[in-house]
Image: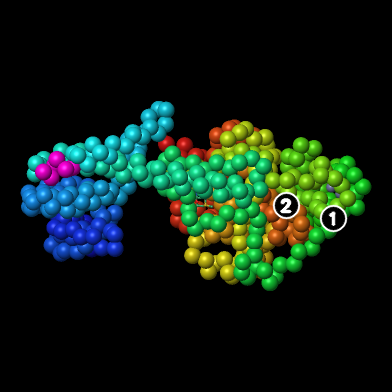
Amino acid sequence: MSSTTHRVEIDEIIDDKIAENETLFQVRLKNPPVKFWLPCDKMPSEDLIIKYVIRLIPTLPSGRREVARNFDRIYDLVKKPVKNELNNLMNSFRTLRGLELPFSNYYFVLKSLQNLIHERITDYEKIASVRRDILVEEMIKERQSQLENLKSTEIDINIISDHRKPIKVVNDYDLEKFPSSLNYINEQIFTKSGEKKMEKVIIGCECKSSEECRRSSCSHYDFERDVLSVIQPTKKAKAGEHSNLVVVPYDDRGRSLNMYPKFECNELCKCDANCSRKVVQKGSNVELEIFRTFSGCGWGVRTLEAIEEGTFVCKYAGEILLWEEAKKRDCHEYLFDSEYSHDWNKGHSRYIIDGYRYGNISRFVNHNCEPNLSVQIVCIENISVELGEICFFAAKDIAANEELSINYKDLILRHHQTCKCSTCYDYYE
Ligand SMILES: C[S@@+](CC[C@H](N)C(=O)[O-])C[C@H]1O[C@@H](n2cnc3c(N)ncnc32)[C@H](O)[C@@H]1O
Ligand SMILES: [Zn+2]
Ligand SMILES: [Zn+2]
Ligand SMILES: [Zn+2]
């Protein structure tokens, strides 16, 4: 059995028009020679556009008014980038010092194009060079508008954010703006189905001082021990090895000491603000940046300062959904479930947090096969471990400017995505 692969190749552009503010090209295929209209950003190469302009210029009428009208038409034709062209152009201005874009030279560019039309120049190189100058102007405009978008996003995020240090938003990779579908929030919120099932039970401890909350007499310690005994027999056995020690969740500097679910002191407790069982509720104290990765993973998060192992970094905010609701959602890339919400009879989590439409910085954390963050459950104003805060802590000492990552290989595989994490990338190199 033989199969022939047919490559659809465009022979030439034969006409252009503007419909609903968009430039369309009428193209003819090589084989079969059918004609159809194609929007500019679907054009496979700039070569076709330049050749079209070469054929167009000599046919333009020469009257003054017509020249002016045709100038607009030609300008509109050549200023449209084909796929990825502006991003590639931006790359050509990358130096060892970083991105160095030129200053705008708009007047000069208009003059050159006017000259082409007036002199009826049909030289490929000249037209290509004027087109490139025009695209550089378009790129500068796009970059300006992107920087304004990122700056205003950064301001909006920091008005809302509960982090103690400002969050930065940068993109020096391409011209992508911040995702407009995201509404920034700090907490897990109820929008739909989860609401009916959730009941909040808050219990404080009777400790008279913060010092007492470090001992096994603190009632939060009982919750921690109970969760381990009910949900994770293997973890309980491990905890049992230390049964003569008090397994407090945090050290006196607020760093996580183990991977077990933690119960923080709350407003009903009699201890003070310095209690070492109060960490996540005080907000992250790490300087973080949402940035556009160079690995092709889209946005990511990096730390702008060194982080010590065990430090609380951020928690996953989003909509609380019942599993049945979550699976109906269009985008599954920001769904997060905790192992403590697992329903063993049904084989999936009862509750899922969706960070797609409502979320915070955590929904930008990428997957790495050797992650530098670990996921831990922390209950603050709620004793239900299945609806605890999903918190990211430093799994090792992390250097300034490192990208932060957790492990969600199963999601990457489920979406048939190639893992582009630094661990796999090094491996293939
Ligand atoms: C929770 S989001 C992370 C933020 C995402 N990069 C963005 O731009 O919004 C998960 C998605 O990011 C991408 N991603 C994260 N880690 C990746 C990896 N190691 N390799 C490839 N894609 C990854 C995948 O598209 C995945 O579905
Ligand atoms: Zn206590
Ligand atoms: Zn306390
Ligand atoms: Zn990987």
Q: Earlier in the sequence, mark 1 or mark 2?
A: 1
The residue to which callout 1 is attached is: 268
Quadrant location, the N terminus: bottom left
User: Residue 197: x and y, percent?
Assistant: 70, 70
In the displayed structure, 64 sits above or below 97; it is below
Q: Is residue 114 left or right of residue 345?
A: left
Q: Residues within 10 Å of mark 2 (few under 14, many from 20)?
A: many
Q: Which amino acid type is marked by label 2?
A: Val
- Foreground: 49 or 410? 49
- Foreground: 146 or 171? 146
Q: Which amino acid type is marked by label 1?
A: Leu
Q: Is residue 338 left or right of residue 364?
A: right
The residue to which callout 2 is attached is: 378
Tally of marks: 2
Q: Is residue 428 visible?
A: no
Find residue 355 and report its image quarter. bottom right
Name the residue: 77% across, 42% down: 250
Q: Is residue 167 left or right of residue 419?
A: right
User: Residue 415: x and y, percent?
Assistant: 47, 57
User: Which type of secondary structure does the marked residue at label 2 adopt?
Assistant: strand
- Foreground: 316 or 338? 316
User: Residue 81: x and y, percent?
Assistant: 28, 48
Residue extent of the magenta highlight? 113-118
Whether residue 115 appears in magenta in the rendering, the answer is yes
Labelled disc at residue 372: none
